[in-house]
Amino acid sequence: MTALEVKTSTRDQILDATDRIMARYGFRKMTMDDLAREAGLSKRTIYLHFTSKEDVGLSSIGRVVESVHRRLASVAGEDCPAQDRLRRMLIERVMGRVESVQQYHHSLDELFEVVRPAYMARRKLYFDIEVAMISEVLADLDPVDVQEKATALLLATNAFLPYSLSVRELGEPEEIRRRLTTMVNLLLRGLQETRG
C-alpha cells in the first residue's frame, strides 16, 4: 500500500467513525476523543488528517458530494439518450446525497449549523461542478443556453437536497424519490417544450 493509499484509508476510517458517532449522538456531542476511540486511532492521528471538528464535518459532507459526483460522471458517460442521462443525473444528484446520510439524517441540522459559514463556499464550488456536468449532457440535447438551463434545473431540484429537508422528510427517502421524480419529469417536459 502506498503512502497516499494509507492516508486515504486512514482518512476514510476517521470519516466512517464520524458517520457512526453522528448516528448515535449527533455532531454537536461528538468530541475528538470520541472520534479517536471510535476510529481506533490516536487523537494525534486524527489531527494529522483534520485540523478541527469542523474540518471533520466539512470533510464528511465533502465525501458524500464527491461520491455523488463520481456517480454523475459515470451516468453522463453512458451510451444512452441525453434525456435519459439527464433524468438519471438529476435524480442521482439528490438521492445519492439523501441515501448517503440516512444513517445520521437526524443530526444533519446540527452539522450544518456548526459548519455553515465554511460550507457555503464549498457549496458554490460543488454547484459549479454540477452545472458543468449537467451542461455537457444538455449540450447533446439542446446546445442553446446550456449553462443557464443547467443552473435552472439544479436550482429547481435543490429543494430536495438534505439541507433543505426536515428530519422527518429525510427519514422518508422513497417519498423524496417519488416527489423528486415527478419534479424532474416536469422539468424535462418543460425543457422539451422550449425546444420544440
Image (tube, rainbow, N blue to C red):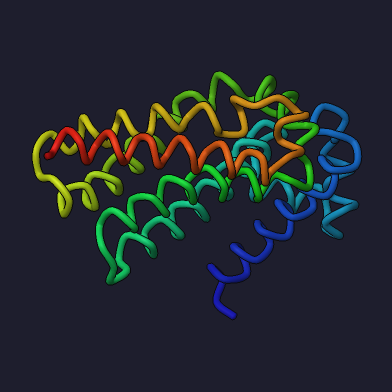
Question: In front here: 38 or 41?
Answer: 38
As drawn, 126 above or below 45: above
Q: Which of the pair 194/101 is nearer the observer?
A: 194
Residue 127 left/right relative to 113 = left
Image coordinates of residue 97 in percent, x first then y, are 58, 45
Q: What residue is at 31 percent from the left and 28 percent from the top?
A: 152
> Residue 179 vs residue 69: left or right?
right
What residue lies at 83% left-to-right and 49% top-to-bottom? 20
Relative placement, left or right, of 172 versus 138 is: right
Given the current orientation, which residue lies at the most extreme left position? 144
Image x and y of residue 174, in percent: 67, 46
71 and 149: which one is in front? 149
- x and y percentages locating residue 132 in the rendered image: 26, 44
11 vs 53: above or below: below
Residue located at (50% from left, 52% from top): 68
- How many dots with numbers? 0
> Is 128 left, or right, of 174 in this rendering?
left
Q: Position of residue 43 (x, y in %)?
A: 81, 47
Which residue of the protein is positioned furthest toward the bottom in this rendering? 1
- Quadrant (top left, top right, bottom left, bottom right) of the C terminus: top left
Residue pictured at 52% horizontal, 38% vertical:
180
Looking at the figure, which quarter contains the N terminus?
Answer: bottom right
Q: Nearer the viewer, residue 154 or 12?
A: 154
